[in-house]
Amino acid sequence: MSLVHPSRRGGLFHVITGLAPGGAELALLRLVENIILPPGCVTVVSLTENDGEIGTRLAAAGAEVLALGMARGIPDPRGLWRLARLLRHRRPALVQSWMYHADLLAGLAARLAGGVPVVWNVRNGSVDVAGVRRSTRWTARVAGRLARWLPVRIVCCSRAAREIHIGLGYPEERMVLIPNGFDLTHFQPDLQDRQRVRAELGIAPNASVVGCIGRFDPVKDHRGFLQAAARVATRHADACFVLCGAGVDPGNGRIIQWVRELGLEQRCRLLGHRTDLERIYRSLDVLVLASSTEAFPNVVGEAMASGVPCVVTSVGDASWIVGRTGHVVPPRDTAALAAAIDAVIGLAPEGRMALGNQARERIREHFGLATMVARYEALYRELTGDVWDRRDH
C-alpha cells in the first residue's frame, strides 16, 4: 500500500528548528523512514542547520533536506520570508512543523504563502520550570495566542503536553494525541551484545549496571542522578553507572566535579553522545530517568523495548509509559530515586529479566512504531482530502 501524490500538487513539508539529535528530531526521522509516500514527496526544512547523522538519514530515506541557516536564539525576519517564498513556490499539500519556534514560523510563513494548511507538533511537558529558555517560554505563549488561527491541527506526543498546552490557550478541539512509537526490531535484547558492550566499557559481566541517558541540561538533573548513585553504591559493591548524551563526557568539568565529590570516579562511565544507543541499552540492568520535566521521554520507551526495566520521575507521560513494569518516584527526590534503583538491581537476575520482558511487551502493545506511523498517515489523509489516495501497488 502507498500514499500516491498527484503531480498537480506539492508534497509533504516538515519544518523543524534544527536537526541535532533530540527527541523531536528522532521522532521525525522515524516517521520519514517508515511512512509510505512516493519518492520525492517529502521535504524537511531545518530553520537552522543540517546536522550530520539525522540529516544524512533523512536524505537516505528519500527526503529532500534543506537548511535556512538561521542563527539559534536570534529572531530573524529574513528566515520567515525565505520560508514563505519556499512554500509559495513549492505549494505543498500540507506542512507539518515540530516544536515552538518552527510551529510559529511555519504557521506565519504558510499564511504569507497563501494559506497552506499547517499541522503543529508540541512536545514540551512544561514551559515554566528551571532550564527552559526564556525565548522558548515566550514563543510557546505567543504561539498559544495564535493557535486558533494558524494550525489546522495540533499533534501532542503526550497526555501531559496536551493538558499543559490547553492551559496555555491552545484550542483543545484541534488537538490530536499521537504518542511516540518505537521499533522493536531495532531496540531488542541481545545477551551476547550485552557482554560485548560491558567488556568495551571495562565493566564486569555480572555487575549491576545503571544507566542515565540524556543531554547535559538542568532539566535532566544529572546531579540528582549521581547523588542517588552514590547512595546505591554504598549498598551494592558491584554497581556501575553509565551516563551518555551530548555534553555528558570527561570534558565536562561540572560533571567531573560532582563525580569526584561523590567518590564515584571508579564507578562511572561518561560516554558523551553515542550513535549506538541500542547497544548501550542492552548492557543495562535498569535505566533511570531523573528529569524534572519531560513530555514523552524517548529513552524510556527505547530502554523498555530493549527489555530493560526503568525507574522514572513522575514527569510528563513517563509513568504512563512504564505502567506497572517499573518504578515511579517524585522529581528531585534523591532518596526515593536511590530506593527505587535498589529495588530493581536487588532482584535476582531472573526477576530483572522478567520485569524487562514485561516492559518490552508493554511497548509492543501500546507504543509500537507502526501504530504511530499509521496515526500520522490517517491524520494527513484526513487533512489533504484526495491529494493523497491509498492505492495498491
Image (spheres, rainbow, N blue to C red):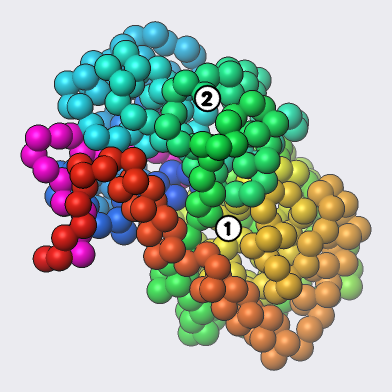
Quarter of the image for the C terminus: give it. Answer: bottom left
- Tell me where residue 282 sits by quadrant: bottom right
Q: Residue at x 54, y 73 (%)?
A: 365
Q: Is residue 90 left or right of residue 186?
A: left
Q: Which residue is mark 2?
A: 147
Place of residue 119 in the rendered image (x, y in percent of width and height, measured from the top left) = 41, 35
Q: Which residues are magenta?
A: 1-22
Magenta includes 253?
A: no
List x then y, in percent, for residue 78. 34, 9
Q: Residue at x 39, y 8 (%)?
A: 77
Residue 48 horizontal side relative to residue 84, left or right: right
On the question of residue 148 being in view, the answer is yes
Residue 259 or 6: which is nearer the viewer?
A: 6
Name the residue type under label 2: Ala
Name the N-terminal-most of marks 1 and 2. Answer: 2
Q: 360 above or below 80?
A: below
Q: Are there few (<14), some (14-19), or many (20+) residues within 10 Å of tag 1?
A: many
Amino acid type assigned to the residue bearing label 1 in the image: Val
Question: Are the residues flagged by discs 1 and 2 in contact, CB closer than 8 Å?
Answer: no
Q: Position of residue 4 (x, y in %)?
A: 16, 51
Mark 1 or mark 2, whichever is nearer to me: 2
Q: Main secondary structure of the magenta part?
A: loop
Secondary structure found at label 1: helix
**Left or right: 220 with respect to 245?**
right
Q: Which residue is mark 1?
A: 299
Viewed as shown, does residue 325 lie left or right of 279? Answer: right
Q: Residues within 10 Å of mark 2 (few under 14, many from 20)?
A: many
